[in-house]
Image (cartoon, rainbow, N blue to C red):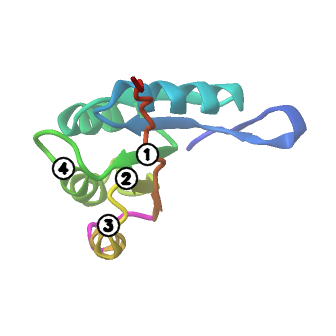
């Protein structure tokens, strides 16, 4: 049985596993989510994500579709197949923005999908 806590203004506080191989994205997500009162766990690859989902029992997984080694799609399939993790909502994200990505994510068993922001890099002009 899971116990939930409510923070300021009655907002449900949850433990969220953020999975992305780009450290700045994980750090930004951590800052935003922790500022809202949530507990954040991060992983930078698929194998680590599965291990943390099994061991830390997050309430939600935010999962990048494109990861080195095991893809986010494969991670989602594993999590949705295992008894201990199949009830954890998985929301996938990508910066690719292709129409087919949403369907592929849904077929992998994810509970939600969104297009993540693209990182902006400044360029110096001469």
Q: Are marks 1 and 4 in contact (CB under 8 Å)?
A: no
At 44% across and 55% down in the image, what residue appears?
Answer: 91
Lower sequence index among marks 4 and 2: 4
Which region is colored magenta?
Answer: 107-111
What SS does tag 1 mark? loop
Q: Which residue is mark 2?
A: 95
Residue 110 is one of the magenta-drawn residues: yes
Q: Quadrant of residue 98?
A: bottom left
Mark number, residue 105: 3
What SS does tag 2 mark? loop
> In x, y percent, where is residue 117?
48, 48
At 45% across and 64% down in the image, what residue appears?
Answer: 111
Question: What residue occupies the far left of the structure in this picture?
Answer: 69
The quarter in which the N terminus is drawn is top right
At 39% across and 23% down in the image, what residue appears?
Answer: 126
Q: Which residue is mark 1?
A: 118
Residue 108 is one of the magenta-drawn residues: yes
Lower sequence index among marks 4 and 3: 4
Mark number, residue 5: none
């Amino acid at each position: 049985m899971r116990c939930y806590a409510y923070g300021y203004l009655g907002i449900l506080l949850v433990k969220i596993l953020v999975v992305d191989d780009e450290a700045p994205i994980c750090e930004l997500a951590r800052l935003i989510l922790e500022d809202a009162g949530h507990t954040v766990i991060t992983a930078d690859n698929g194998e680590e994500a599965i291990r943390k989902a099994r061991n830390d029992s997050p309430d939600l997984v935010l999962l990048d579709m494109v990861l080195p080694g095991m893809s986010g799609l494969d991670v989602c399939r594993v999590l949705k197949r295992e008894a201990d993790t199949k009830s954890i909502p998985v929301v996938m994200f990508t910066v690719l923005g292709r129409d087919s990505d949403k369907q592929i994510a849904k077929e992998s068993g994810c509970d939600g999908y969104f297009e993540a922001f693209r990182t902006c890099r400044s360029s110096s002009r001469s």
